[in-house]
Amino acid sequence: MTARSRSPRRARIPRSHGGSRSDVGGWFLPVLPNTRIERALRRLNRIPHLTRASWRAATSAIALAIGLTLVTAGPASASFWAPQKGGSPNADRIHTLYAVVFVVGVIIFVAVFGALVYAMVKFRARPGAVAEQLHGNTRLEIGWTAGAAGIVLILGIVTFLMLPGIRNPDNSDKDGFDLAGYQTAKDKDLLPPNGKSLNIDVNGQQYAWRFTYPDKDADRQNNVQAYEEMVVPTGTTVTLDIRSSDVGHAWWIPKLGGKADALPGYTNHTWFKVPAKALRNDDERENGRVFTGNCAELCGRNHANMTAQVRAVTPAKFQEWLDRQKADLIAAHEAAVEFRAKQAASDKAEAAAAAAVDDATEPTDSAAPSGAQR
Amino acid sequence: MATVTATPIPQVVAHKVEKPVTGWVDWVTTTDHKKIGIMYLVLTFAFFGVGGVEALLIRLQLAVPDNTLLDFKTYNQLITMHGTTMIFLFVVPVMAGFGNYFVPLMIGARDMAFPKLNALSFWMLAAGGLVFYASIFFNPPECGWTCYVPLASKDYLPNGGVDSWIFLVHLTGIGSLVGSVNFYVTIANLRAPGMTWSRLPLFAWTILTYSVLLILALPAIAAAVTLLLTDRHFGTNFYDPAEGGSPLLWQHLFWFFGHPEVYIMVLPGFGIISEVLPVFARKPIFGYKAIAASTLTIAFLGLMVWAHHMFTTPSPSVVLVFFMVSSMLISIPTGIKIFSWIGTLWRGTIIFATPLLFAVGFLGTFLIGGVTGVILAIYPVDWQLHDTYFVVAHFHYVLMGGAVFAVFSGLYYWFPKMTGRMMDEKLGKISFWTMLIGFHTTFLVQHSIGLDGMPRRIPEYADVGNLAIYNLISTIGAFILGVGILITAYNALRSLKHGAVSGPDPWKANTLEWFTQSPPPQNNFDAVPRVRSVEPMKDIRAEIERRNNEPKPVEA
């Protein structure tokens, strides 16, 4: 015990007096120079010799691949590298915020990846090269920690500056749909600063969306409803109350901004405002421009077929559409009332006829006990 | 007390000698951490193969617009099986496999602290996999690996698939929990003399963190799936909004487990990278303490970011802001790790063996996953990207390009130790480049697929935008990736018989597992040297060198 405490190394590793590599200690396994492996390891480090022609071929092949991708995808749609935009200011602002973060990310990637590649090329094992046995560099480590924290801080500040514009609805444009008389009982934070928006109820169900439009009265039974396609006026802030009546769904029209989950038992909110200039030609000004999206939360087997459409039309066209829907609704209601009255009359007539028959066949049975009496 | 071998051995007189069990009985009844580790690795790589075939079927279905190869039901089953297999049956347990085999060896222990519990963990995992895959004979689950309610409730998915998923989570969860306690106790108590906490190998640090995270996160998912089970079968209404329950409760419980799970999967990968890079750069790890500390910081922050999976749910802004900030903060310790790894390579003499290639492939790929992670953490941006292929690309960069590349690095690095034979370098390099090219072809373009408006988990898409060409590229890449993985599989099987004999320490590595024979004997070490640094093997080699160069003592 005393021997160990005085000189633990000697006590533990028995000293070999043999001197040759292979018999260092009785218990310690010999580290054999395994030439086959060592030679293989040395071979690994050779840069394969490529002729000038093959370098050129490889470079041009890569350049061609990148170029083709850019040609086919890049200009054709901005969504190659960033989210879609163009249908609503919040989508545009998300695009801008993404672009800022993306550029920062690309710079970080290029810097770090560049350092990695530089290290790989510069510090590959060469004959005679000796690795520098350093364990760290406190100043450098604190430096890059602070640098990373600084970048995160800047990204955070940019995000918080841009957040209100994305989250909070804008006011409607002057030439938007006239919202006078429309009321929305809604948290003020969810409405534009002037408190006026076209508030549409969106209800997700397997596998379709139902849209309920507001009108100027308090009766919700006579509101206009639509399935599959939501028609909205341009230049008008549309706020959405999103619900689900079965499983979880997610409302998403990429060009009109972000997603909002439809979850049973909860009401979710989002908004958009299609600018008047989003209608790009006469055809769109006449028939409206359609923005499409998919349900973005797995909702069952037909999830892929749960599409959503928003057709943006001019306020005048929207008024026409709303009036037509309303007229149809009233007509349908009147038809239903008429039908019900007709049916009631015929039921009455039938009952009277049946009673007459009953009276004729079983005159004494009219005092049979009813449920209440029993 | 001059040498260990001089200790007198007590004589035991045996009246009856048990015949040693051999063959499959030995494997089934073993409590040896190395055999259990091998079983873990074989089983999990088998599941990796199955999950990979499922992935290829998914990519085949998505190769062209409006494809009718698979019906919607089968497709939903495939995405559920693929996600669940890869997460519960491959990436998490494969780390337990490496941990099982190498943690005791690295810390100079003879076995895990509780060998029988160790066997129990493995058989729980096997049972979980069996129960889950038994569902293919009746009705596999079709709710995605997240099994969101109400879709996973009895009303919408009444068949037994979801139940098999619940039992998988329970069984593998018990296995992981028992295994985690075992790892923790082993690392806390069985370290070699002299191995203080600041000399613990970084892989052991990450396995320790992995265990703590599992112990903290698993109870949440166990509770969540138990509530789901009682909702489905015993008339409770924890998740039914019509009866006062809440579907958001499921999401919170699930992701309270689900996000730490991401770090559970990737942290041991970080550990493998931290072991491999110094060995092949012939340089000590740069900033050992910073790397160990950032592992713990990531774990700590990782427990408080779960709701960044729920940015699109109806949650108050203050919640969204909190989880955005905590998610962005995680990029700082992750950045420290990446910088330190590059610092490890800097001014080294880098040997381009296959383990190093995979480790560097991991670095570059994971870097992209980290950058897209910051983009996704910003919640207004996430509103556009959530549940799209952008997210699919992001987490495959982290888990496939990150964790799986690290696993392959570990496989090539430790294969000689486990089998006594080297894997073929040429095949390894071919496999690496094929996998790297295949991986980026598959997943880089998926960012654009998501930005172009394609959500996750849809079996067919309309031919709008550039979706058709992007998806075709992605599918082609998936098959290249598959070929790359097959080459490594072939390499491993071939090297079992034909690989070069490795000897105890073919890489001239730093940690104690290389001190013993390859493969190690049942008791691992006859004696363990005192550990004096993070790199005990370097000290031992230097000592041998010193003694060899000593002048021969003159014979008396």
Image (tube, coloured by chain):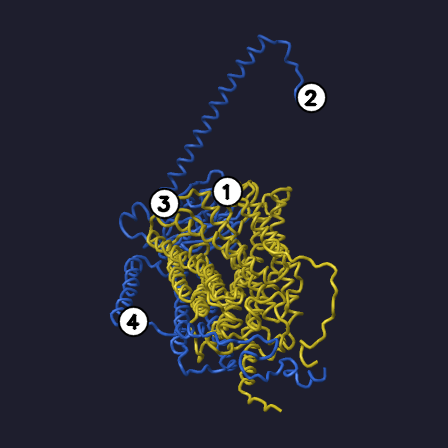
Please give left or right for residue A337 compared with residue B211 in the image. left
Question: Quick one: which chain is yellow?
Answer: B
Do the dots labelled 3 and 4 sit on one chain? no
- Give the Cα separation between the discs numbered 2 and 3: 64 Å
Determine which residue is flagged by label 2. A373
Specify the amino acid type for callout 2: Gln
From the top left corner, tell me how far across and down residue B344 is, in percent: 48, 76
Q: Nearer the viewer, mark 3 or mark 4?
A: 4
Residue A320 visible:
yes
Confirm whether circles 2 and 4 share one chain.
Answer: yes
Local secondary structure at mark 4: loop
Location of mark 3 (residue): B66
Mark 3 residue type: Asp
Is there a contact, CB below 8 Å, between mark 4 and mark 1? no
x%, y% of residue B369?
45, 64
What is the chain letter for disc 4? A
**Residue at image coords 50%, 40%:** A219
Q: Which residue is mark 1?
A: A218
Q: Is B391 above or below relative to B360?
A: above
Of the numbered discs 1 and 2, the one sitting upstream in the chain is 1
In what element is the residue under mark 2? loop
Position of the N terminus of chain A by quadrant = bottom right
Displayed quadrant of residue A121: bottom left
Say which of marks 4 and 1 sits in front.
4
Subunit under mark 3? B
Q: Are marks 2 and 3 on the same chain?
A: no
Residue placed most toward the observer, A22 or B193: A22
Q: Secondary structure at mark 3?
A: loop
Q: Do dots 4 and 1 share one subunit? A: yes
Label 3 crowd (10 A; few <14 / some 14-19 / many >=20): some
